[in-house]
Image (cartoon, rainbow, N blue to C red):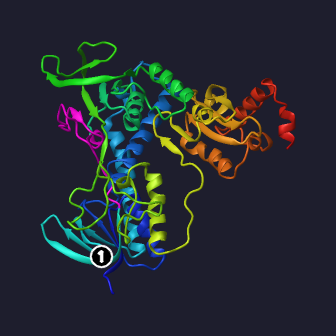
Amino acid sequence: MNYDYDVIIIGSGPAGFSCAMQSTKFDKKVLIVEADENHLGGTWLNKGTVPSKALREAADLILDFHSQFGDEKGRKPFEKFRMEDLLSYKKSALESKNKKVKSDLIKNEVETARGWAKIKDPNTVEIQDNLNQTKTYTTANILIATGSSPLLPEKFDVDDNHILDYNSILNITHIPRRLVIVGSGVISFEYATIFASLGTRITILNDSDEFLPFLDSEIRQSILKTLKKRGIVLHKLSEMMDVKPNPLRTCMEVIFKTESENRKQVIETDHILYVGGKKPNTDNLLAPGVDVELDQYGYVVADKTYRTTVDNIYAAGDVTGEPTSASSSFVQGRLAACNMFDIPTESPSGDIPYGIYSIPEVSGIGLTEEQAKEQGIDVTVGRAYYENLTYADINHRTDGMLKLVFRTDNLKLLGVHIFGDYATDLVHLGQSIMVQGGTIKYFIENVLNYPTYSEAYRIAAFNGVNRVYKAGVKYKNILEK
């Protein structure tokens, strides 16, 4: 049967974009459907990854300048810099990336359609545009890459003025002096450190008893120390009671209580940033009779080839659940294209690194020390503190550490966990060694540039080997193997 397209991709985020690029390399006819009538790239390009990281880089530059040279009048960064300048930095990054994505799609002859897609049957997609006009297309394959959206708060409304979400915070007109962040996840941590770097007084209301519980415990403790040093207040097990304006004091009041102190407390603030959970964008996507299975939360169920319960319908990216990151989505979209067109490919080997774009950054891969011990593996750890790195000292950015987790008997590297500048880049050196089944001997036996942040690997490796020696293991014999 002849179809209009070889694949119709619903969503132009990282999963959809990479699937389109890969499919065109197989000489397939591709259509991308995007609901946003103005921009391609979805949340990745317009509301999430790229704009927030652009804002982060601007804040990091200001912090770097402030750390190096200070201010002769003792002013906070928000007294010297305007939010307009930071937004201009963000805007230029978005414009450049939007042009690049559009150029890539045109160059690779990927067709696009604007509107809301509905899968009518396994080979038919209906698209309704903003004028309520509908068009129907047929296709051999479908990729669902619709991503996810933030959940709304239950006890108050986001007005995009005093009460913000992760989208409207990127369009704020000034640097706030005070900001209360409601949320316990990665995004709340990122924004807390970004605005703290600009001099904003930050309070985080965390509804759980753990903060970033997936991190190695030592890395987490190091982060908490840095938060305290920067004046960021963290309330655990906090419950929001109310948010209301105080016209006499020209501020907002956040009323909450914590489990440790079962009484109402009030914080005065300029703005509130709500960062809750996410929900998959699957509402009204499937027509009755299309048997694509969704889980209890509405996420699309897909197997390791990204095929759903309908043979020619695939799904990739945030719409399938964890891991929810642009880096994972790019890989998933490419692999989905390979699988739907029967092109031999290999899934990523080894663990997937995570990256938190806070200031400083956090990244890691593999087993934490706690996880290794729970599995009964005899491990030793090696540590390098940023305060002992020449390059960090030069930059006056000495918060952080790099931690290696490795087997005691053969020095095989099992995990790398980093808190500090350039952590999201540094982690890939450890990842390369782990994928090859290598040991920490690599960092001892090879030359690493000096001064660099990569030097932390060499320091941590020697630190770990010394621990093995002091534990009574003859590490000389290990090194000679």
Residue 418 appears in view: yes
Query: What's the residue at 21%, 66% (across, down)?
Result: 287
- By secondary structure, the bulk of the magenta-drawn segment is best described as loop
Residue 168's spot in the image, x, y percent?
26, 41
Residue 130's spot in the image, x, y percent?
16, 64
Residues shaded magenta? 145-171
The residue closer to the viewer here, 326 or 79, is 326
Residue denoted by label 1: 123
**Residue 421: quadrant of the picture:** top right
Does 167 sit left or right of 135 as displayed? right
Are there few (<14), some (14-19), or many (20+) residues within 10 Å of tag 1? many
Residue 471's spot in the image, x, y percent?
77, 24
Residue 148 among magenta residues? yes
Q: Which amino acid does label 1 sit on?
A: Asn
Q: What element carries label 1?
A: loop
Residue 104 appears in view: no
